[in-house]
Image (tube, rainbow, N blue to C red):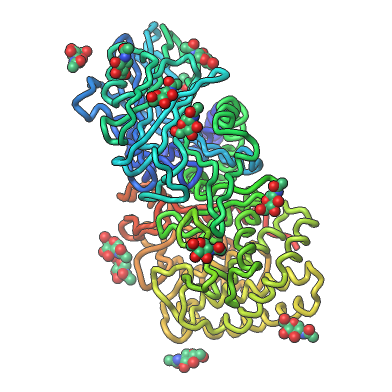
Amino acid sequence: MVELKKSVILSSLIVSCTAATQYASNVRAPSYPLAVRQPYVSTWLPHDSLSGNWPTFWSGTVKGWEGLIRVDGKTYEWMGAASTGSEVNITNVAKQNAITTTPTQTVFSLTAGPVNVNVTFLSPVEYKDIKRQSIPLSYMFVTAEPSDGKSHSVQIYSDITAEWATSDTSQQVVWNVTSSNGIRTWSTSLKDQYPFGEVSDYPTWGQATYTTSNNATYASGADVDVRSAFVKNGKLNNTNDSNFRCASCSWPTFGFAHDLGNIKAASDPIQFVVGHLREQNVQILNQSTNALWTEYWSDANSMIEFFYKDVSTAQSNANKLDAKILKEAYKAEGQPYADILSLSLRQAFAGTEFAGNSTSPTLYMKEISSDGNMQTVDMLFPSSPVFYYLNADYLKYLMDPLFYQMENGYWSKPFSIHDIGSHYPNASGHADGNEEDMPIEESADMIFMVANYIFNPATAAADAKAYAQKHYKILSSWAEYLYNNCLYPTNQLTTDDFIGQTQLNSGLALKGILSMKAFSEIAHLVGNNNETKFYTNASASYIKTWITESQSADKSHLKLEYNVTDGYELKYNAFQDKLLKLNLVPSDIYTEEANYYLSKMDTYGMPFVSTHNYTKTDWETWTAAAFGDANPTLRTKIVKGLSNYLADTPTRVPFSDWYNTTSAAGEGFLARPAVGGHFAILALNTPAKH
Ligand SMILES: *[C@@H]1O[C@H](CO)[C@@H](O)[C@H](O)[C@H]1NC(C)=O
Ligand SMILES: *[C@@H]1O[C@H](CO)[C@@H](O)[C@H](O)[C@H]1NC(C)=O
Ligand SMILES: *[C@@H]1O[C@H](CO)[C@@H](O)[C@H](O)[C@H]1NC(C)=O
Ligand SMILES: *[C@@H]1O[C@H](CO)[C@@H](O)[C@H](O)[C@H]1NC(C)=O
Ligand SMILES: *[C@@H]1O[C@H](CO)[C@@H](O)[C@H](O)[C@H]1NC(C)=O
Ligand SMILES: *[C@@H]1O[C@H](CO)[C@@H](O)[C@H](O)[C@H]1NC(C)=O
Ligand SMILES: *[C@@H]1O[C@H](CO)[C@@H](O)[C@H](O)[C@H]1NC(C)=O
Ligand SMILES: *[C@@H]1O[C@H](CO)[C@@H](O)[C@H](O)[C@H]1NC(C)=O
Ligand SMILES: *[C@@H]1O[C@H](CO)[C@@H](O)[C@H](O)[C@H]1NC(C)=O
Ligand SMILES: *[C@@H]1O[C@H](CO)[C@@H](O)[C@H](O)[C@H]1NC(C)=O
Ligand SMILES: *[C@@H]1O[C@H](CO)[C@@H](O)[C@H](O)[C@H]1NC(C)=O
Ligand SMILES: *[C@@H]1O[C@H](CO)[C@@H](O)[C@H](O)[C@H]1NC(C)=O
């Protein structure tokens, strides 16, 4: 009876919470997403407190973004670190009480004397709507609420600095302020624009913008002057500094101040919109290509205005998506999984941006932090579960640029290309064949992703068939390559290139064999009976040989390299056996392997390969999904280990997908879209149909 009462009380508590906050994460994040939407709109807080610290670009470069509140004439800092400098007279730093993270939002609650300040950062993930998803902007909302029931005079201030225009602050910047239809926008950019270039991974063209309603006062000027004016007067003098200079020359700063007057209860949210935009965003085979948003809006200001005023739709979509993901994650693996996904969604989508037009949209992905390659096949693939789960069309938008180059004479090798550009955003291709070859890896990845798109339950039958037919020829050539090469893989790289080349790699062979079976399903769809039969039979025969070659002498596990290295490596590719319902790997092998993995669990999860004490978060989750049926305890332990890593890692960077399982330290790799792979368990809720 006591038990029963407790659960009744608990469930009534849960009902009283809003949908969006139920199962929201309170775990300490290595870095909190603030404005995280695209490869160049990626500003984070790699600290515990919003007040007293500078936000940074994913790479660690400071992006000056300040927030102040004046309560009865006394100023408190709620964001940024102007208070750490001596020139501005800000001595009060708001005390932070809590941070709540959901898949699309990060909410900070702070106390500024007698007033509570809540700051919400919302980076929409508009997975159903490419028009809205193409917008390179993000929201910030600030509310103030007296905590003592008394009336207080309140003003709220925020600015960005010209650090948003460039990561090389010795460069000259320009700016202006425009106002129309109720909003005002600061815009700042490099004086000399270098299209399609980067400095420290930040773009050398385009403009940063900061917008709020036009009843705010505004000013540009030296950081110290603009902020001091607010501290002193609680407002700005609507002036525009006309002295263009370098970004670190008296730090050009662009501020807004809102006067809330005397408030006794919670204020309406004060809204800001921040971002960085380029009208032409990528270069394909030396051709400048328009950002997709330019198709819907004639200029930057009308796009900004749409986004600014779209706020209720944006919030409602975000709350719905948060609720869906958190609920499903909690149901699958409890709060640890909800925590992981709360820090994965924005990062996964922010590895991409749309270009092209609405009839032929293309989505480009940057291999952030590992080498900046463009459209890396083995980066699309680990991230693919989030797209499979939310909208499989995204897989098509991502693959189209790869197919374009490989089907039109810009690639001649018998296996799939690795990427279409050595550095984002320049897809200059590898027509000379000079690239980081991963022959079996990339060919199999492409076949799997096509199968993930066409057999996704949400893909229309006609679209699926048309896509399979359109690319059948090249897919068939890769299947043939795999038939000839995947059973006994020669010395080569897999996606895990940091462990170096391996030979007779059992995981790579499995990947090839499974993709041959996936290809037989594609052949079936297009009505090629011979190849359907050929690859069904070939994969069935190969899998038997593969088991014989891979199994350890004591039949306790599958080896890393057939007869070369015993050890083990997570057979994460088995996830595709489950997702595509290929049913090629026998269930006793799943059981044997899952039990073995369980014996390899370290403090923070499971090393993905026996030769090193580190792991990959994407491959852990793929493994949890694939082997979860065979051993639910394994799945739970992997998810728990991964969430513990997130909470404990001493490496304060955006979610690193490569870490030490003993110490939780990051090994490199940050902010990568690979974290889309964390959705593998949810993707399996709707396996492919064929
Ligand atoms: C800083 O503020 C304090 C208290 O408001 C004031 O006494 C002092 O004169 C100010 N200093 C400057 C440099 O404005
Ligand atoms: C404002 O400046 C930005 C670059 O900083 C430029 O792209 C835009 O055209 C300017 N707008 C006006 C109205 O001058
Ligand atoms: C306006 O404020 C700026 C700093 O924010 C200051 O440099 C400038 O002198 C002020 N102008 C007037 C007219 O007060
Ligand atoms: C702001 O100042 C710059 C530099 O003098 C100028 O080009 C721009 O037109 C000004 N904008 C406004 C709205 O005053
Ligand atoms: C400023 O304008 C916005 C929208 O135009 C409104 O919601 C807000 O209440 C206004 N703020 C003040 C202080 O008047
Ligand atoms: C601010 O956040 C706190 C803690 O999450 C919450 O209790 C409070 O209702 C929020 N206040 C407003 C005005 O949103
Ligand atoms: C792109 O430009 C480079 C340098 O001018 C040239 O070498 C290359 O052939 C061009 N590529 C294409 C596809 O036109
Ligand atoms: C859209 O883009 C595709 C691919 O670049 C191009 O073939 C097509 O002509 C474009 N359509 C329009 C309406 O511009
Ligand atoms: C059937 O398909 C396989 C694999 O593509 C090919 O090697 C073989 O020649 C085909 N046989 C016939 C009769 O077309
Ligand atoms: C391992 O197997 C391969 C392929 O069957 C064979 O060529 C090689 O000689 C074997 N190596 C050893 C050390 O047994
Ligand atoms: C992994 O860590 C454990 C415990 O710290 C140690 O015993 C083992 O040798 C390490 N393995 C590797 C491959 O470094
Ligand atoms: C992992 O951390 C442990 C403990 O600090 C250390 O001994 C080991 O060398 C690290 N391993 C790797 C692969 O970084």
The picture places residue 57, in percent across and down from the top left corner, at 38, 43
Image quarter hosting the C terminus: bottom right
Q: Quadrant of ligand 3?
A: top left
The vertical placement of 580 against 40, above or below, is below
Q: Nearer the viewer, residue 381 or 549?
A: 381
Number of numbered discs on residues: 0
Q: Residue at x 20, y 24 (%)?
A: 87
Left or right, 689 with reference to 178: right
Left or right, 210 with reference to 680: left
The vertical placement of 509 against 285, above or below, is below
Q: Residue at x 45, y 65 (%)?
A: 598
Image quarter hosting the N terminus: top right
Q: Nearer the viewer, residue 292 or 491?
A: 292
- Which quarter of the figure has residue 264? top left
Q: Nearer the viewer, residue 261 or 255?
A: 255
Q: Residue at x 63, y 70 (%)?
A: 409
The picture places residue 92, in percent across and down from the top left corner, at 25, 21
Q: Residue at x 36, y 35 (%)?
A: 173
The picture places residue 353, in percent across and down from the top left corner, at 55, 47
Left or right, 315 with reference to 686: left
